[in-house]
Image: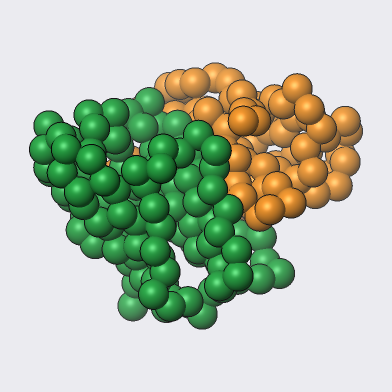
Chain colours: A orange, B green
């Protein structure tokens, strides 16, 4: 099955620092979704990107979809302790199934 | 009210047993899913189901079977449990035409 790789696997940042996770695919993605999973919690939908080069913002979060639609990034400005969790990218296929990336686990040190 | 609920939250059982996990959504969604999250946090689709079509991920053993008594429920039956089945299982749902999926709180299955 398809798999989308995310880097880094783990990231520790000091509160107030920025954080970026990258999602890379060897094949062209039809779309990319981002989910956040708090420790002990369940994945929660953040956003979907569809167009080449698309950029969307949600407060301190900036999402980008690469021009070639093979990569995506999530950038958090000035992290807070509430940002702790694992961030997943995912592609939704034509059968409406989600194939998740490997995830990036973010720890924010107060 | 919980949008997508699962029971039980925790399930500890022995190898070889048969068990079920229940999922209910009160969102009126028409497609439901089961995902498996292993100890490394990898999330993998197992099934997607609407009232017309069941799509099975080819890597899922046939010991796993989804059963949907109605549109609001998609239960997961697992026969002859194995140690490797230990994981967190998430149910999710989606409404037709939308792209976001809503996940349940998860069921942590431990096979001893």
Please state the horizontal and vertical placement of residue B93, each as a whole percent of the image. Answer: 50, 64
Residue at 50% over, 51% down: B47
Q: Is residue A48 above or below residue B70?
A: above
Q: In this view, does A29 lie above or below B101?
A: above
Please state the horizontal and vertical placement of residue A20, each as a whole percent of the image. Answer: 61, 28
Q: Is residue A43 left or right of residue B107?
A: right
Please state the horizontal and vertical placement of residue B109, each as a whole percent of the image. Answer: 23, 43
Q: Where, by quadrant of the figure, is residue B72 drawn?
A: bottom left
Frontmost residue, B44 versus A81: B44
Q: In this view, does B82 lie above or below B78?
A: above
Number of marks in picture: 0
Frontmost residue, B5 versus A35: B5
- In which quadrant is the N terminus of chain A drawn? top right
Residue at 58% over, 32% down: A101
Q: In this view, does A51 lie to the left or right of B45?
A: right
Please state the horizontal and vertical placement of residue B100, each as a whole percent of the image. Answer: 60, 59
Frontmost residue, A3 versus B70: B70
Frontmost residue, A1 versus A63: A1
- Using the rendered image of the protein, determine whether residue A38 is visible from the camera's viewpoint: no
Q: Where, by quadrant of the figure, is residue B26 drawn?
A: bottom left
Residue at 60% over, 63% down: B53
Q: In this view, does B67 lie to the left or right of B11?
A: right
- In which quadrant is the C terminus of chain A drawn? top left
- Using the rendered image of the protein, determine whether residue B53 is visible from the camera's viewpoint: yes
Q: Where, by quadrant of the figure, is residue B20 drawn?
A: bottom left
Residue at 54% over, 19% down: A8
């Amino acid at each position: 099955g398809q798999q989308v790789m995310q880097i880094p696997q783990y990231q520790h940042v000091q509160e107030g620092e920025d954080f970026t996770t990258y999602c890379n695919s060897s094949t062209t993605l039809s779309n990319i979704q981002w989910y956040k999973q708090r420790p002990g919690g369940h994945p929660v939908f953040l956003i979907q990107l569809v167009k080449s080069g698309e950029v969307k913002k949600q407060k301190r979060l900036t999402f980008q979809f690469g021009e070639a639609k093979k990569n995506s990034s999530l950038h958090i400005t000035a992290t807070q302790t509430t940002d702790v969790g694992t961030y997943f990218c995912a592609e939704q296929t034509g059968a409406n199934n989600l194939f998740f990336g490997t995830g990036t686990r973010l720890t924010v040190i107060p | 009210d919980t949008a997508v609920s699962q029971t039980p939250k925790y399930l500890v059982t022995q190898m070889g047993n048969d068990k079920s996990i229940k999922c209910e959504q009160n969102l009126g969604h028409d497609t439901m899913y089961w995902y498996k999250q292993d100890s490394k946090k990898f999330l993998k689709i197992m099934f997607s189901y609407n009232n017309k079509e069941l799509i099975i991920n080819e890597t899922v053993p046939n010991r796993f079977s989804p059963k949907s008594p109605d549109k609001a429920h998609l239960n997961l039956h697992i026969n002859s449990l194995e140690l490797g089945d230990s994981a967190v299982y998430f149910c999710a749902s989606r409404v037709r035409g939308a792209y976001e999926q809503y996940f349940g709180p998860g069921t942590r299955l431990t096979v001893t």
